[in-house]
């Protein structure tokens, strides 16, 4: 779970963002390559970016994570001399603002609240990785439910009853994140739409029954806290 930036909470980081120049990328553009020097931290303003690792053979790159609006990408640049861990590819048309990694590091040091959130986000990633490793014995549909809930909680507007996501991720991206086949993702989503758990929108998705989706997930879903603050 990348660090989400809340400008009102951190004036120094917000000042860096205001001074930055937004750059727009078309879907499929490579933003940076795995192994490249990490100098800049990127703030996603619109769209989403896929973090990928290479596959063996003739297969395309595998999506191992996504970052979306309000989240920081490439936080390796906060630590000096750390190469990029992944290749970042625009998953949709997106707008990002580049921030100097050393300046972000100074801003984090000067803001205990944001620094604590940064450390918690890293602890969360480790906890999620442990849960995912324990979820390998669960069905593909359960892992797909996990992925949908994670994206809903991060990018959706939650009114306490349902969660509206005004952005759509491809079935290929969902399949990679869940470790499933794309056809399995399509079947699972269609089943949940038929049962009223999900409702598809022209450019997004509504989770009508988050509790049902949580029960369909793995232990990772059952341990994940629901965020009730609407956007």
Image: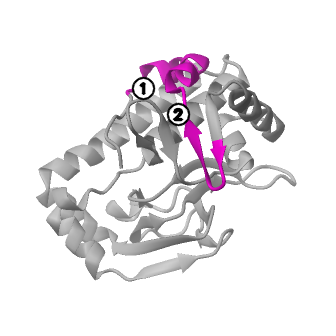
Q: Quadrant of the N terminus?
A: top left
The spot of residue 19 in percent (x, y) is 27, 81
Q: 114 or 197: nearer the eye? A: 197
What residue is pinned by disc 2?
149
The spot of residue 93 in percent (x, y) is 60, 70
Q: Is residue 208 magenta?
A: yes
Determine whether, in the image, residue 187 is placed left or right of residue 12.
Answer: right
Q: Residues within 10 Å of mark 2 (few under 14, many from 20)?
A: many
Determine whether, in the image, residue 226 is placed left or right of residue 48.
Answer: left
Q: Which residues are magenta?
A: 200-225
Q: Name the secondary structure under disc 1.
A: loop
Q: How far is disc 1 from disc 2 in space, using C-alphas? A: 9 Å
The spot of residue 34 in percent (x, y) is 59, 62
Q: Residues within 10 Å of mark 1 (few under 14, many from 20)?
A: some
Position of 177 relative to 84 (above/below): above
Quarter where residue 226 is shown: top left
Which residue is depicted at the point 47% across and 18% down? 222
């Amino acid at each position: 779970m990348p660090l989400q930036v809340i400008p009102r909470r951190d004036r120094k980081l917000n000042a860096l963002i205001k001074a930055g120049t937004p750059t727009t990328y078309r879907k499929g553009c490579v933003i940076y390559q795995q192994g490249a020097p990490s100098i800049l931290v990127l703030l996603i303003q619109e769209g989403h970016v896929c973090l990928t690792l290479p596959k063996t053979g003739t297969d395309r790159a595998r999506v191992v994570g996504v970052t979306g609006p309000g989240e920081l990408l490439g936080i390796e640049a906060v630590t000096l001399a750390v190469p990029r861990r992944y290749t970042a590819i625009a998953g949709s048309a997106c707008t990002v603002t580049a921030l100097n990694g050393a300046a972000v590091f100074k801003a984090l040091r000067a803001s205990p609240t944001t620094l604590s959130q940064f450390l918690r986000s890293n602890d969360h990633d480790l906890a999620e990785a442990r849960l995912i490793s324990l979820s390998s014995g669960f069905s593909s549909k359960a892992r797909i439910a996990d992925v949908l809930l994670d994206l809903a909680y991060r990018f959706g507007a939650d009114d306490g009853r349902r969660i509206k996501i005004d952005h759509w991720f491809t079935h290929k991206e969902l399949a990679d994140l869940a470790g499933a086949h794309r056809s399995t993702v399509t079947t699972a989503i269609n089943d949940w739409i038929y049962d009223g758990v999900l409702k598809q929108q022209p450019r997004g998705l509504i989770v009508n029954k988050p509790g049902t989706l949580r029960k369909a997930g793995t232990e990772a879903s059952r341990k994940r806290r629901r965020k009730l603050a609407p956007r």
